[in-house]
Amino acid sequence: MTRPAPFSPPPITLLSLLLAAAFILSLSAGKIWIAPADWFADNADGWIMAELRMPRALLGLAIGAVLGLSGAALQGYLRNPLADPTVVGVSSCAALGGVAAIFFGLSVWPYGIFVCAMVAAGCSLLLLGLMAGYGSARGMPAGPLGFLLGGMVLSTLAGSLTAFLISIAPNPYATGEIITWLMGAITDRTWDDVIRAGPFMAAGAGLLMMTGRSLDGLTLGEVGARSMGVNMTRLRWLIIGGVGLAVGASVAVSGVVGFVGLIVPHVMRSFVGEKPSAILIPSALGGAILTLTADSLVRLIPGPSEIRLGIVMAVLGAPFFLAILLRARTQGAGGFGHA
Amino acid sequence: MLKAHNISVALGTKKLLGNVSVNLRPGKINVILGPNGAGKSTLLGCLAGLILPSSGGVTLDNMPLADMDYRARARHIGFLPQNPPVYWDLAVRDLVALGRFPHAGRCSKACDDAIIDAAMAAADVTDFAARRVMSLSGGERARVLMARTLAGQPRWLLADEPLAGLDPRHQLQSLAQMRSMAQSSTGIVMVLHDLTQAAHIADHILLLKAGQIFAAGVPGDILTARNIEAVYDVSAVILKRGDRLVIVPQMSD
C-alpha cells in the first residue's frame, strides 16, 4: 500500500495546537458554558472550573493520550493495523475488576473500583506475559501469535465473568450501576481520580515511549528484528507493562472507552507515514484530541442526561472499523501489514 | 573466527542438524550448499545466533554467541534473511537506516547518515531512496534489504540466498561487493543454490546433506560430479573455462 508523502508542516506542532483548542473546548463546554475570562472567577463558575471541569479535562487528555499511544505501540508490536488495547485483554480484565468491586460493594470505598481494576489489570498482564513467553521458552516465536492468543483467552474469560456477575447481581440497582460504569465516562471525576490514575498512566506511557526503535526493527518481522539486536523479551514486557499500567489505570477511572487506540494510529499514518516510532507521539496527541472533543460533544448534545463517552466512541469507531476493512479488501492482503 | 561446535537442532522429532562443527575464518567467502531441507538456513541461523542449538554452541572469537549482548552480537554479525516480510510501507532510506539499530548512541547522526548513504550506494539503491518499499520490485527490494545489512557495518555477513530475485548485473555486482568486503577482512557466509556461482565466488564450501556436513573444502575439491550426485541425486557435467568451473546439473538416469 503506497502512502502519500508525509505532511510537511510538522504534524506534532499542528496536533499540539489542536490539542490546546480541544482542551480549551473541554474546559468551556457543558450545560453551563464558561468563557475563559471566568475560569478563575471567585464564583460558581470558578468552582465548577476548578473542581469539575479541570480534573475532567485532564483525565480526558490523559486517557485519550494513553489509549492512542497504546494502540500505536500494539499495532507496531503485533504488525497489525487492527490491533488496539482491547485485543490484549487488559481492558476487559480491568473492567472485570471494576465490576467485581461494584458487585461486592467495594465501590463505596473511595479506592475500591480503582484498586480492584488495577489489580485485575496487573494479574492479566502477568498472565499475558507468561502465556506469550510460553512459546519462547520452547524455542518457538513468542511474538504476535502468543500475544494475540493470550489476549484473546483473557478477553473472552474476563467478558464471560463480567456477564456472569451482571447476571447474578443482587439487585437492579447494582446491575444498573455496573452497566453504566461499563459504558465508560469521565463525568463527575475529581482531582482524587487524577491523582490516583495519573502516575500509573504516566509510567505506562513512559514504558511505551521506550519501544519506538525496537518497533521499527519489527518492520522486518521477528527474525529481522532479532538479527538487528532487538531484545524481543524486553520489548514484550515493555509493551505488556506499558499497556497494562496505562490502560488499566484508564479503565479504572473511566470504564471502557473503546476505539481510540484503533482509530487514531490509522489517521496518524496518513500524515506521518508508517514508521512505527514516528506515530507514537502523534497518536498520543491525536488520542487526547479525539477524547477531549468527544467528551465535550457528549456535554453539548441536548437531553436529560449526558450520553456516555464510551457510546460516542463506539458510534464513531464502528463505521471507521468497517471502512478499514473495506479499504483492506480493495487493496488485497497487503492492506493488512504487507506480509 | 566463527565456530560451531557439535551443534544439533531438532524440531519436534525431526532432526534439522546433527553434530555439525565448522570453523569459519574472517576474510573468506564461505558458501553453504545442499538440497532443500538439508539444514542450510538452520545452520546459518545458528551461526547468526538466531537459532539456539539443542546441543553444542557457536562462538565468535571464542565468546559464546548465547552469552553476547543482543546489540553487540548484531554489531558483529549482519544477517540477511531469505525474502523477509516488510510489514510497514517505509521510505527506502528509513528501511536502510534500520541497519544502524545496533549502533544506536555510538555514532553521531552525521556519521550514521554517511554510512547509510555509502550502504545505499554499494547496493545501488541510491536512486530510489525516497520511494516507498511497497512500490519496489522483488529485486529492488532485495537490494534495499542488502543495503540495510551493509549499513550495520558487520564484521561477519551471513546471507541466506542473497542473489535470489536479482538480475544478472546485480547478481555480479552483489558478488563483487562481497569479494570486496572479504578483502577488507569481513567474513562472508552465504547460502546459494547455483553451483557455478558457488564455484566462482567461494573460498570455502560446506556441502550439507540431511543435516550433516557431507564435505567441506575448496570448490575444486568439493564440487565434483561424485559429490553432487551423492548430495543432490543429479548427475553433473563439469566444464573448465580457464580457471573457472561451469557446473551443469542434469537429471540422473
Image: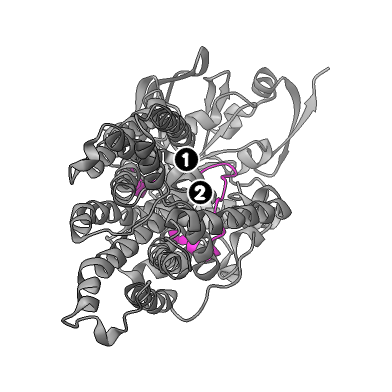
Q: Tag 1, which secondary structure?
A: helix
Residue placed at 47% from the left, 50% from the top?
Answer: A75
Q: What residue type is labelled 2?
A: Leu
**Does residue A7 show up magenta in the picture?**
no
**Which circle marks residue A317 in the picture?**
none
**Which circle marks residue A223 in the picture?**
1
**For residue A188, what is the image quadrant?**
bottom left
Front position in the image: A26 or B119: A26
Q: In this view, does A312 lie to the left or right of A138?
A: right
The answer to whether marks 2 and 1 sit on the same chain is yes
**Which circle marks residue A220 in the picture?**
2
The quarter of the image holding the C terminus of chain B is: top right
Q: What residue type is labelled 1?
A: Val
Front position in the image: B133 or A119: A119
Residue placed at 47% from the left, 36% from the top?
Answer: A148
Q: Residues within 10 Å of mark 1 (few under 14, many from 20)?
A: many
* In the depicted structure, whether residue B15 falls above or below residue A143: above
**Does residue B76 show up magenta in the picture?**
yes
Residue placed at 33% from the left, 34% from the top?
Answer: A124
Q: Residue A255 location, x and y as percent?
A: 36, 48
* Labels 2 & 1 near each other (Cβ < 8 A): yes
Q: In this view, does A50 lie to the left or right of A144?
A: left
- Specify start and end residues of the magenta stretch as a single range: B73-98
* In the depicted structure, whether residue B136 falls above or below residue A332: below
Distance (Cα) linking label 2 and label 1: 7 Å
